[in-house]
Structures are given as C-alpha cells and as structure tokens.
Amino acid sequence: MATGVHAPRERLRRIEAVTDTTLGHLGVEELLAELLDRVRDLLEVDTAAVLLLDRSGQYLVATAARGVEEEVRQGVRIPLGKGFAGRIAALKAPVILEKVDHSNVLNPILRDKGIRSLLGVPLMSNGQAIGVLHVGSMTTRRFTPEETELLQLAADRVALAAQTRQIMVSRAAAATLQRSLLPAKLPVVPGLEFASRYAPGGGGEVGGDWYDVFDVPSGHIYVVVGDVVGRGMDAAVAMGRLRTALRALALQTHDPADLIARLDEHVRHFERGIMATVLCAVLSPSHDRLVASSAGHPPPVSTSPDGPAQVVDVPPDVPLGVDPSRPRRATPVPLPPGRALFLYTDGLIERRGHSPDVGIERLCAALCPGPADAICGKVMFELLGAHPADDDVAVLMMSRLLVDGAEVLTRR
C-alpha cells in the first residue's frame, strides 16, 4: 500500500483504473473480464468473482470469475442470505472474512482453492442488490476501508455492465422464443386465405402478443390473437405457455367461450399472477359458420366486397386471470364468401393522447377488399408508418375467397 505524500496519487490511480472511460468500447463479457483482472491487480488478490441474482431472486449464480473459474463452470448457486455471498446480498453491505472456514462459506470451491480471507461488496441498482462482487486472498489478510471502498467502486461499474448483459440476454432470448412460437407458415386451406404481421414495440423489446391459426381432427379451424400483460422475457414465456395450453384445450371443445373458460381455469391454477386478453374464433369444417369469443380483447373488423369495413360486435368478457365467476359468451360472426375478418392486438390502435376509438376508425378506413397479405401490409403502413408503436403489434387476417364471383368449394 502507498503511504505518505504518495497516498492521494496512488488512490487516484486506483480509482481511474476501474472507471477508465476507454473500457466503454468493450462488450459486456469482455468488460466484466477486464474489470475483474484490474481488481485482482489493484487489490493484489488471488481471485475475483461476480455472482448475480437469478430470475427468482432467491439464488446468486456465478457469472464471471478470475482465479476461481470453476465457480462459473460448475454453475455455483448460493441461496440469498446464506453463506458469504448470500449475506452480502441480503445485507446490501460489504462483508469481510479474515479467516475462511466451514461456518462462514458455503462454496466448497473457495475452501478447496485455499482461500484464507475474503472481501465482498453488493452490486446495487435502484436501491436493490442484484449481485455480489468478491475477492479472495490465499494468505490471511485484513482488508482496509480504502480497499473496501475501491471494490465498491468497481462493483458499481460491474453492476452497470451486468444490467446491460441481462437486458441483452433477455431481449435476445425473448425474441428467439417469440419467433419460435409465432407460426412460421400459416396453413393452406382451400377456400380461405390467411396473412399476418408482427412488429415489436417499446424500443424493440418483445412482449406477450401472439397470433395463431390451426385446425383439429374434426376439421374446425381456430383463429386466435392474444396479448399477455407485460413485456420482456416473462411476458414472452407466459405467452408461449398460454398458446400451448390453448392448442391442447382446443382438442376438447369447439365452443370458443368454453375454450376461453377452460384456458382461464388453467391460468388461475398454473399461471397465477398472469393477466391476458384473447380473441378466439372457431370456423366450422364447412366454413359457413364462425363463432367468436373475447376475453377483454379489442373487437375484430370485417370487410366485404360491397361495403366499408365494420367493427364486429363481439362483446368483450373479462380478461384471463381476473374473475372466474363471470360468464363467457360466444357470438356468431357472418363470414359469407368474399368476407374477411381482421384480428389485431391493442398496440395497433392505441396511441398516447388518443382514444382507442380513434385508432379503430383509422383501422376501418385502412381496410378494404383485396389479397390478405397486401391488406395486412397496407394496415401496418398506414397505422404505424415510420413511427414505432409503443406496444407490440400482432395482426391476423382471414378471408373467405370468391372465384369468379362464386363461393369456393371446400374439400376436406
């Protein structure tokens, strides 16, 4: 340690080493590695490691390490409040162990490595501990207040990097999950035409919007649009589970109101805390009968060759996960030859400072008879334009075709 007149200069050098602006060009993983290397050098320690709270908020997971890489390779998990790292996160305060033993360290790797002394500080964000940064020495050592302060300074930088990493990983995973769950290709059904679009909102972070088209062995065709409340990975995961559950339940009933009631029961039992809106329409095998039910979802809009687009009166019942005592209703919806049904999520019509009714009026004005894919593109162009939506947008269009003015015969 520097002493005398050199102490302030040495302190400044140490601070600059962990706050160096030239680190800004590094990627998150490289930044974590570089910071840990600098911390080891500055504090003259043998090990340095970062543990981050997992999604449950109950365990610290080894994420980056120097000198004790086994922590990361072996997926070390420390319960919040337990052991050395767990205490730091729970207390939101530094902890110093001058002598490591079985009573104060849970992780056997640290003991097997021969670590004698440990210093750890919390990684803080908005007053909450999101992880721990700790360093270890293979010789018995008394860490000073200045060293603790320096490690906390490094921890603040690590916390920023860790948050960036978590956001990047979450967004990438959520986007991959959502792409895998949205239909890669809509079904080809004689006499019908389908088209869809999806656009993430909120700066590109995906959410819980989805659409789906599928048939069941009876020949009934299910057309679904839904929206799980929330954003990011949690919403995308919940969306995937609801989509899978709805498909499974569709094998048990052809009544969309009954289907949504069963899905609501599934949510209340297995997905507590989730709220979602869903619009489900079921088309008969002959394509001459369509029935729809809405769990708090915006109403569909229909188009026809002989008139303007109109909002379809499908009374909205309560969203999923709200009130199991409220009944679910099924509404017949006309779908004669040449008619199309346009379904969407609220991100298409809702804008800050404007009523959703204004958005629905704009949607009706944008819709017209024509090829489904072209109409979907026209709607996205006219309602979104060059400005990204505040929320995700999912749209799905189903048309019953005409051939030379006559109904297309269906063959199943």
Image (spheres, rainbow, N blue to C red):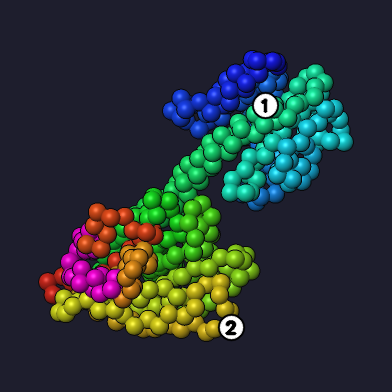
The dominant secondary structure in magenta is: helix
The label number, if any, that marks residue 48 in the structure image: 1
Image coordinates for residue 375, horizontal then vertical, percent = 21, 63
- Magenta residue span: 358-381
52 and 207: which one is in front?
Answer: 52
Image coordinates for residue 286, horizontal then vertical, percent = 32, 76
Image coordinates for residue 340, horizontal then vertical, percent = 25, 72
In the image, is 37 to the left or to the right of 188? right
Indicate the quadrant where residue 191 lies. Answer: bottom left
Residue at x 76% of width, y 26% of height: 143
In the image, is 387 to the left or to the right of 205? left
Q: How many marks?
A: 2
**Tag 2 and tag 1, C-beta contact below 8 Å:** no
The answer to whether residue 125 is above or below residue 20 is below
Indicate which label's residue lies in the foreground, 2 or 1: 1
Mark 2 or 1 closer to N-term?
A: 1
Mark 1: amino acid: Ala
Quadrant location of the C terminus?
bottom left
Q: Is residue 102 magenta?
A: no
Label 1 environment density (alpha carbons within 10 Å; few <14, some 14–19, many ≥20) = many
Image coordinates for residue 24, horizontal then vertical, percent = 46, 30
Quadrant location of the N terminus?
top right
174 and 358: which one is in front?
Answer: 358
- How much space separates mark 2 and mark 1, taking CA atoms? 55 Å
Is residue 114 visible to the viewer in this orientation of the structure? Answer: no
Mark 2: amino acid: Ser
The answer to whether residue 131 is above or below residue 256 is above
Q: Mark 2 highlights which residue?
A: 325
273 and 4: which one is in front?
Answer: 4
